[in-house]
Image (cartoon, rainbow, N blue to C red):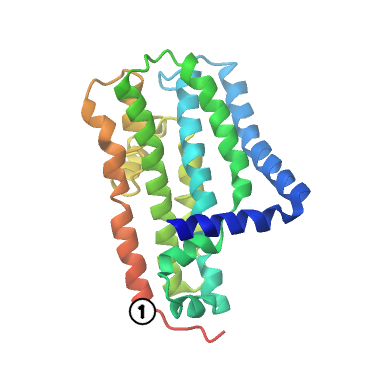
Amino acid sequence: MKLYFRYLSMLLKSQMQYKASFFMMVVGQFLVSFTTFLGMWFMFDRIQSVDGFTFSEVLLCFALMLLAFSATECFARGFDRFPALIRSGELDRILVRPRGVIFQVLTANVEFSRMGRFAQAILVLAYAIPTSGIVWTGDKILTLTLMFVGGLGVFTALFVLYAGISFFTIEGLEFMNIFTDGSREFGRYPLSIYGEGVLKFLTYVIPVALFQYYPLLYLTGRSQNQGLIFLPVLGMLFLIPCYLFFRFGLRKYQSTGS
């Protein structure tokens, strides 16, 4: 971990060499996601609730999804850029180094400018928490924390899966954005509003609902089942098959000769 944080320090210093450019990118990331928030605000200015969920409750969904996704984009971006490592031959150099592949990929690309989105998510969460009407007992705080951690796990798993697929396709597959960016967009609202089919898909195939929808039911008092608190931990198990698929692809890897 000490070496990892040293890498992070080096990457941050390198990105801060052009401070004006860096801060403009951070502000840009903040404003891009802020337009989404404005759209939600204007919509709820006309209606009172969506599928029974109030504006503040929907903001909890929006903030937690944005919080988890932006943090994953920042620190696991190396997997999203993995096809470029294969095409350029950089992966060959990674394989002959004494450190593990996962470590090197994680430290190959860390985009601190994504903290603009992260900051916006914190601000929205700071507004939604006191206005949601939720009594914040210890179990509710634990639920909120596990929802964020579970989101990190699921989104990281999707990036790892994307990297694993690129072993066989060389180029990245754009359809994977349906599951990464698409999950983020779907997750702005409680997943029940999209219908039973989408909810089941995002429960049993891509386990987004395990850290977003079901814990939210307990958080907002719509369910008293305390087992929903720990569903984000179950969702994090999605990392295991994605990691195994990545390792399978790594064993089958043949250099592109670049």
Q: Is residue 118 left or right of residue 210?
A: right
Reading the image, the residue beneath label 1 is 252
Element under disc 1: loop
Q: Can residue 136 be seen in this snapshot?
A: yes
Please name whichever residue, 101 or 200, is drawn nearer the observer in this view of the structure.
Answer: 101
Q: Which quadrant of the figure has residue 141?
A: top left
Position in image of residue 246 (x %, y %)? 36, 66
Residue closest to the far front: 2
Please name whichever residue, 66 or 8, is drawn nearer the observer in this view of the structure.
Answer: 8
Position in image of residue 121 (x %, y %)? 55, 33
Vertical side of 247 occupied by 212: above or below: above
State the quadrant of the C terminus.
Answer: bottom right
State the quadrant of the N terminus.
Answer: bottom left
Number of numbered labels in the structure image: 1
Q: Residues within 10 Å of mark 1 (few under 14, many from 20)?
A: few
Residue at 42% over, 75% down: 98
Q: Which quadrant of the figure has residue 233?
A: top left
Q: Can residue 49 be seen in this snapshot?
A: no
Vertical side of 161 occupied by 252: above or below: below
Q: Is residue 126 left or right of residue 201?
A: right
Vertical side of 108 occupied by 115: above or below: above
Residue at 34% over, 77% down: 251
Residue at 22% over, 24% down: 225
Position in image of residue 253 (x %, y %)? 40, 79
Residue at 42% over, 20% down: 53
What amino acid is labelled 1 in the image?
Answer: Lys
Position in image of residue 92 (x %, y %)? 49, 80
